[in-house]
Image: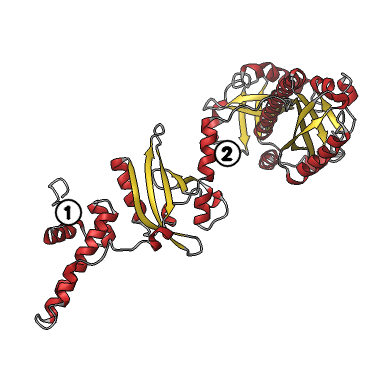
Amino acid sequence: MRPFAAAQATLGELDGMAMETLLGVANDITLVVDESGVVRDLSSSLDNIPADELTHWTGQALAEVSTSESRRKVQSLLHLGVAAAEGEPRWRQINLILASGRELPLLLAAVPLSPTRTLVCGRDLRATAALQQRLVDAQQAMERDYWKFRHAETRYRHLFQVASEAVLVVDATTQRILEANPAAARLVGDGGTQGLVGETFPLGVDTRSKEALNNLLAGVRATGRAEQLRAELLDARGEVLVAVSTYRQDNVSHFLVRLSQAAPDTLAQPAPSTSSMLLKLVQSVPDCLVVTDLDGRVISANTAFIELAQLTTEEQVRGETLDRWLGRTGVDLSVLISNLRQRGAVRLFATTLRGEYGAMTDVEISATMVPHGDRPFLGFTIRDVGRRLNGESRNKKELPRSVGQLTELVGRVPLKDIVGETTDLIEQLCIEAALELTRDNRASAAEMLGLSRQSLYVKLRRYGVGDLPSDADK
C-alpha cells in the first residue's frame, strides 16, 4: 500500500458530508464501532438490500451480529485494527446476519479513527461467493464424471482381457494394431499381446485371405457398414470368421475386428425350420400377399405385390395404406376391414388394383384376421384374375329379360313411362351390385352409392331386394 505523500494537506479539509460520500463510493458497507466493539453508526451503498435489513446492527456488538464461525475473526479484526493504526489494514472475510436471518458475506478491514472509534470498511462478497460455489460444484461434477469414466474403463479393460472371442482395435488409416486381447494373441500371434500391437493387419492368415481382408477393410472404410468373411489361418490351423465394424474416436476412424473359429464346412447343415420354409414360400409365391395392421397400413408385402403395384422395393410399401392401390378409394378397404372385424375372413372379393403408373388389374382378394396378443393383424391374398375374366363370357350381369319387354312397349306406352321403368331397373341393378360387393353390408353399400341408410332401406323395400332391415339395423 502506497500512502498519500501529503495526506494532511490534501485531505485535511474534508468535512463530514464529503467523508460520507467518499466512504460510500469506496466501500459497500461502512460501520463505525466503539472501543467495546458495538456498532454505533453505519452506511450502505448496496441497492439490493433494504435499509431495514441493516439498521438492527446499530447498538449491537459486531460479534453478536456475526455468524458463530466469524466471531473470532471479528475480535481479531478489531484488535488488529487498533494495533495497526500506523500500518496497512488487514482484511478478514466475515459473514454478518441480516434482520431476515440471511447471511451477508463481507470482506472487512478496520481503520482506527480515534481511541474510541474504529471505522470498519466492508466489500460485498456475494458475487465472489456465488462464483466460488459454482466453481466447487463444477469441480465436484468433474470429479464424479472422472470416476464414472474410470469405472467404465476398468469394466471395459476387464471384459476385453477375459473375452473368449479374439478382438483387435486397428487404426483405419494405417491398419496398425492398437490393442489386442489375449484371445487374439493366441489365435493369430505368438501368444503375447504386446507382440501384436504395432503390427499391420491382416496377419496370421494365408495370402488369399489377406487380399480378401484388405478388400473388406477398404469397403468398410468407404461405406461404414459392418462386414464379415471367412479367412484361412496359416499352417493349416483352420478357418476363422472375421467380422469388421468401424467407429470414430477423437476424430480418428478405427476398426473393431472380431475373430472367431468358423464351423467346418463338412458339418451337416441343419434342416430348415418350418417357419423359414414358410417365409421363403410367402416371398416367392406368385400371388400377392400383404400383411397390414387393423387400420390397413402395410406392415409387409411380398415380391409379387411390389411388382403388381409397379414399385421396386418393400420400403416404398411399408407404412402406406393398402387403400392407396385398391380400385375404389375409401370404399373397398373399409368394406374388407368391416367384414373381417365381423366374420374374421373374406373370400373372393372382386375389385381392381392400381399400379403406381396407372396400370389397372382385375383382382380377387381373400383376407383373414390373425390374433397376435393385444395387436392382431390382417393378411390379404390378392390374385390377378384379369386373364381369366377376359377369356370368360360375362353373362353373369346380363340385363334381365324385362329390358327386352321394355323395348316392346315402344309405340304402345308413352316414352315418359318407359324411361321411368328403365331408371328403376338400372337403380335396382346398382343396388344389387353394391350389396354383392359389400357382402350385404348395408352401411358400406349406402356409402358406395352415395345414399343415406334410410334412403337405401326405402329402395330395398320398393324393389324387394334383400331381407328387410330389422329394428336393430335401424
Q: Quadrant of residue 23?
A: top right
Answer above or below: position of 441 versus 395: above
The numbered mark, 1 or 2, whose residue comes first in the sequence reads 2
Q: Position of residue 341 (x, y in %)?
A: 31, 42
Answer above or below: position of 302 versus 198: below
Is residue 36 at least partly visible in the picture?
no
Q: Quadrant of the N terminus?
A: top right
Q: Nearer the viewer, residue 390 or 219?
A: 390
Answer above or below: position of 156 versus 244: above
Q: Residue at x 69, y 16 (%)?
A: 72
In the displayed orientation, state which residue is furthest to the bottom. 411
Q: Residue at x 80, y 28 (%)?
A: 168
Q: Nearer the viewer, residue 453 or 406?
A: 406
Q: Which mark is residue 95?
A: none
Q: Secondary structure at mark 2?
A: loop
Is residue 344 at least partly visible in the picture?
yes
Answer above or below: position of 59 versus 368: above
Q: Position of residue 309 (x, y in %)?
A: 49, 56
Q: Nearer the viewer, residue 199 or 241?
A: 241
Residue position for label 2? 48
Q: Which mark is residue 466?
A: 1
